[in-house]
Image (tube, grey):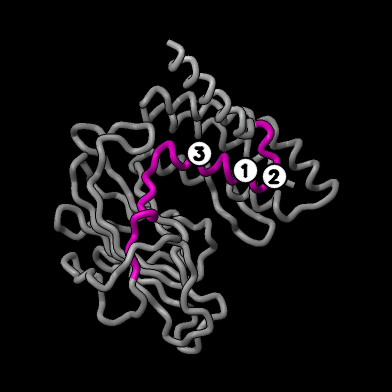
Amino acid sequence: MRRFLSLVLLLSAMLALLPSTAEAQTPDELTTLIQRLIDLDSLDIAKDVKFRPGIEPPLFALDADESAMKVLKNPYEVFGKNTPGAGGWYRVSFTVPEKIGKFPVPKNGFNMGVESNCLGSWEIYTYSNGKPVGSAMASGVSGAVQQGNVLSNRGQHATAWMSNAPIPTKAGDKITVAILATATPLGRGSPEGFALRHLRFRFALGHTFTRQPFFGSVTGPGQGTGLLGAREMLTTLQGDNLKALQEKLKGPLSRTDTLFQAAETEQLDELTKAMKALIPEFNAALKK
């Protein structure tokens, strides 16, 4: 009993350290909230990614030789600054768990998607149970180009999470993802280099069309939509304009608690409905 009470007190103390959703009024606090929300319905696959610098030999094939690859301590490390022809391959393989985030994968399967973003240019190849999968049916990002199971893009803001849904998926399926990232421009090199910036496996299907506008994206300096746009504006606004935005965000941010409550039901539809209800509030708060 004493051990149980100690555990309860420890968990309470840990929760107390998290900012309340209504108080997420700085970019860092909003980043913490966004990460907690992303974790509700997706799986971080970047943490196990392997990397090898160099475009040749190619590593897009399912059975490509990974012996020269290594797991990165920091999967988001930047490579190839000011280097013409800079590029590298990322690969990760995993078995789909019975539960992704807070939600069980239905016994009959569900359409999933791999979300990706890279600094520079990137092309993503995806395989499920040994077969090529992935499309641009609901990429959620402008400029996506599809060729078979290959999806590519370039020069996108870090918040442009390109999805290759739909991928029909069941728990136990074997997924392999290969990404070629290159500096842009490739010929003369880039002072920024190239890097992996986002790689997650998430629930898609109808959930996508609510999830994407809820998180939104940055559409320009100091501009954006959804939670990601709110963070961008909190980063760039100053003085009275910043205070006005913070005041307008208090209401919708306080109601993001409903998303965590919905996730506890383990019914994805409940999270979708909770997100949908908040989209108009965030859009109204971001209007000048």
Quarter of the image where the N terminus is located: top left
Is residue 253 among what the camera can see?
no
Mark 1 — residue?
A: 30
Is residue 129 among what the camera can see?
yes
Mark 2 — residue?
A: 26
Is 4 rendered above or below residue 109? above
Q: Nearer the viewer, residue 206 or 98?
A: 98
Mark 3 — residue?
A: 36
Quadrant in which residue 270 is drawn: top left
Query: Where's residue 139, x and y in %?
Result: 39, 55
Residue type for callout 1: Leu
State the separation of the CA atoms marked 1 and 3.
Answer: 10 Å
How many residues crowd around disc 2 within 10 Å: few (fewer than 14), some, or many (20 or more)?
few
Residue type for callout 2: Thr
Q: Residue at x 44, y 64 (%)?
A: 196
Q: Which residues are magenta?
A: 22-51
Query: Where's residue 110, x and y in %?
Result: 26, 39
Is 69 rendered above or below residue 185? above
Badges 1 and 2: C-beta atoms under 8 Å apart? yes
Residue type for callout 3: Arg
